[in-house]
């Protein structure tokens, strides 16, 4: 049976390279969940970052296919559509959907719609700025047909719905992260977790408000 791109990606996340990235992401997401103590957590695509059925929160995993290994409720939905009420999701985990989805503008509009007023978005993503010279045998994605994104493109998409990146964490070992200069990051694929929140409102220039 032929696997969907979403199933292929979850399989890659179980490979040695993918699993190392996944484990670092899981630690980071666990920290954010502990800090925020959310009522409703939604993950979009990827392997489930929640290890066990959560006792103090509701957890939903949304994907384009129904073959999901998740500890909470699994939902099959088209990309760009999130079947949740407005401002209802406290923590929204985007598990590499920026690499998998085509309609990214519609997608970020849905993200903004469902995110609660003080909600947090965690984006796991594979970033790159230039792929031309990586030999196939050393390419961390192997034969996967996904498109790593630049941090600039993700930031621009989020800005259209008044969301902003407030933290960026490399999902590699501390030793490797220390060796990664900015120059090196520009020439290879590197995995990150991005913490995203709503932009703080600016009261300057609003009628009736003086500086």
Image (tube, rainbow, N blue to C red):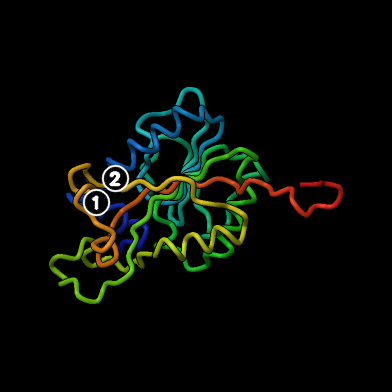
- In this figure, what is the number of numbered marks? 2
The x, y position of residue 108, in whole percent, is 56, 58
Residue that label 2 marks: 22
Q: Is residue 150 left or right of residue 209?
A: left
- Between 45 and 20, which is closer to the camera in this rendering? 20
Q: Residue at x 68, y 45 (%)?
A: 86
Q: Residue at 42%, 51% (x, y): give it.
A: 45
Direction bottom: furthest residue: 132
Q: Position of residue 28 (x, y in %)?
A: 36, 38
Reply above or below: 36 against 68. Answer: above
Task: Kindly give the residue lying farthest to the front in the view shown.
Answer: 211
Q: Disc 1 to disc 2, how far (Cα)?
A: 6 Å
Q: Residues within 10 Å of mark 1 (few under 14, many from 20)?
A: some
**Any mark on residue 108, and which?**
none
Whether residue 180 sits left or right of residue 100 in the image: it is left
Q: Position of residue 38 (x, y in %)?
A: 53, 30
- Mark 2 Cα shell of 10 Å, populated few (<14), some (14-19), many (≥20): many
Q: Are marks 1 and 2 in contact (CB under 8 Å)?
A: yes
Q: Residue furthest right?
A: 208
**Image-quadrant location for residue 85:** top right
Residue 197 is drawn in which quadrant? top right
Residue at horizontal 32%, vertical 65%? Answer: 128
Mark 1 — residue?
18
């Amino acid at each position: 049976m032929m696997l969907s791109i979403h199933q292929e990606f979850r399989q890659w996340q179980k490979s040695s390279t993918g699993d190392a990235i996944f484990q670092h992401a899981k630690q980071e997401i666990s920290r954010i969940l502990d800090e925020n103590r959310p009522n409703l957590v939604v993950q979009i695509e990827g392997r489930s970052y929640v290890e066990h059925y959560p006792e103090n929160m509701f957890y939903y995993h949304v994907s384009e296919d129904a073959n999901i290994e998740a500890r909470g409720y699994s939902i099959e939905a088209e990309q760009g559509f999130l079947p949740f009420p407005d401002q209802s999701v406290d923590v929204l985990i985007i598990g590499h959907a920026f690499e998998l989805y085509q309609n990214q503008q519609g997608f970020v509009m849905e993200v903004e719609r469902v995110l609660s007023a003080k909600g947090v978005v965690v984006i796991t993503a594979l970033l790159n700025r230039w792929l031309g010279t990586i030999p196939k045998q050393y390419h961390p994605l192997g034969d996967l047909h996904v498109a790593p994104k630049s941090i600039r493109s993700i930031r621009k998409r989020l800005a259209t719905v008044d969301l902003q990146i407030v933290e960026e964490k490399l999902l590699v070992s501390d030793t490797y992260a220390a060796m990664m200069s900015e120059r090196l990051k520009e020439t290879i694929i590197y995995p990150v977790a991005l913490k995203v929140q709503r932009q703080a409102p600016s009261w300057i220039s609003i009628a009736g408000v003086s500086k």
